[in-house]
Image (spheres, rainbow, N blue to C red):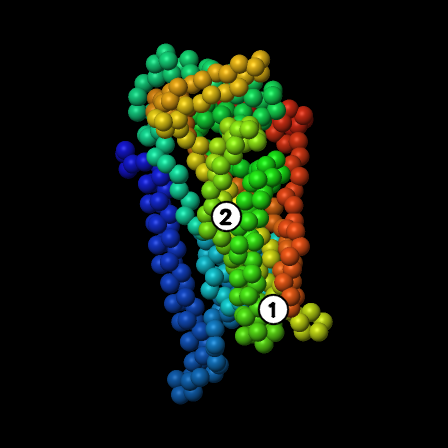
Amino acid sequence: MEGTSQRTKDLMQWYADTLTGLVAHAAEIDAAVTRALKRSHGGDPHNAGHATYTSLDEDQLPRATKLASLGGDANTAQRAELRRLWTSLSPEARAELWTGHKDGLLAAGLLAPTVKKAAPDQGSGPHGVEDPGAEERRTREKMNLVAEAADWKGDNDAARHMARYLGNSGTDMDLPVDKMMSDVPGFNAHIEDGIREHQAAWRDDALAEFRRNGGQPVSMPVETGNRDFAFAPDVDNNWFYAVRSTRSNVTGVVTVVPDENGQPKVGLDYQANAWDRSNWDESKGVTVPLLWGSDMSIPDGQMARLHTTGIAQEFDMAGSSSVKHYDLGGPAPNQDPLPQPDQPGREGDRTDPGREQQEGR
């Protein structure tokens, strides 16, 4: 795919993965139906109909339970199969699986977002297609100094992200979403707005399913669409220079269980997700405030040329918050404040005794 933009590559990969998942899902359902029919028919050709099946739960729930028990040890294929089984199970079977194996399901990445995740723009283009010159090498050294200064200033995430770009590995970077939400109240409010926008509908749908199942526990997967958020330099320099803007959504599970009187109790377990691509294009320059009060400007296109000349490399970044529980109410909805994000620790800053040297230094 020489010359294809990163955004186009991401979209092509998403569609390919989606189609592969649909084909695999159809094959799994076909196999489950075949097994159920064999059990229903039995081995006697003169006496068909030994059992009645109203869903595939009896076939699929044991497999889903086995995969959930793997937790974080599940491989990529097993995680994908588990997510497909989760969508196939009935709401009642999901509740049984969620209640008994929640930790394993979470460790296996059940709440990973399924919305399209693609680079927001074309980026710099192909990596390493030109030879670097003196100007590109000078720019790289300037940005190494800027990253070091940002680290001393306390903008540790901005420094870490710049070091990853200059380190030229192209490897993915984990976004500490709890820290982002804690550091920037506006980003936390952005996540909360996504939940508030959908919580009434999520609650109503789950309650309707609860009633259809005769008051038995049910669980329903939920997910919001992608919502972009831009960090402002006058609010938080660290995250502005680290990511500038990010795409985000919320994934979760709404569960309804009966209380001691048979009345419904509705709860939401959810996480916030964020992702983006750290890239530069020809229209992107950067002006960085320095420790001694002046600014240093890198003109448009110079940062992008570090990628195209092969002495720096763009990378994907993504992460999820810790999972929170929120009471959606009983017979009446709950409007209490949502849980606050986990407070960030010392990881990665200069007071962290276990901190490793930043990449690319």
Residue denoted by label 2: 249
Spot the residue most to the bottom. 46
- Number of labels in the image equals 2
Q: Is residue 34 above or below residue 16?
A: below
Specify which label sits upstream in the sequence, 1 or 2: 1
For this view, does 152 lie left or right of residue 259?
A: left
How many neighbours does mark 1 have within 10 angstroms: few (below 14), some (14-19), or many (20 or more)?
many
Q: Is residue 71 visible?
A: no
Residue 162 placed where, x, y %?
Answer: 49, 25
Q: Is residue 156 visible?
A: yes
How many neighbours does mark 2 have within 10 angstroms: few (below 14), some (14-19), or many (20 or more)?
many
Q: Quadrant of residue 263?
A: bottom right
Residue 236 placed where, x, y %?
Answer: 57, 30
Q: Amino acid at mark 1?
A: Pro
Which SS class for mark 2? strand
Q: Is residue 65 above or below residue 341?
A: below
Kindly identify the residue that appears in the image at 39 percent across and 26 percent down: 284
Q: Quadrant of residue 123?
A: top left
Residue denoted by label 1: 217
Q: Amino acid at mark 2?
A: Asn
Front position in the image: 97 or 70: 97
Residue 136 placed where, x, y %?
Answer: 38, 16
Kindly identify the residue that appears in the image at 48 percent across and 32 percent down: 244
**Pair 1/2: label in front:** 2
For this view, does 243 lie left or right of residue 259?
A: left
Q: Is residue 155 above or below residue 193?
A: above
Residue 62 placed where, x, y %?
Answer: 53, 65
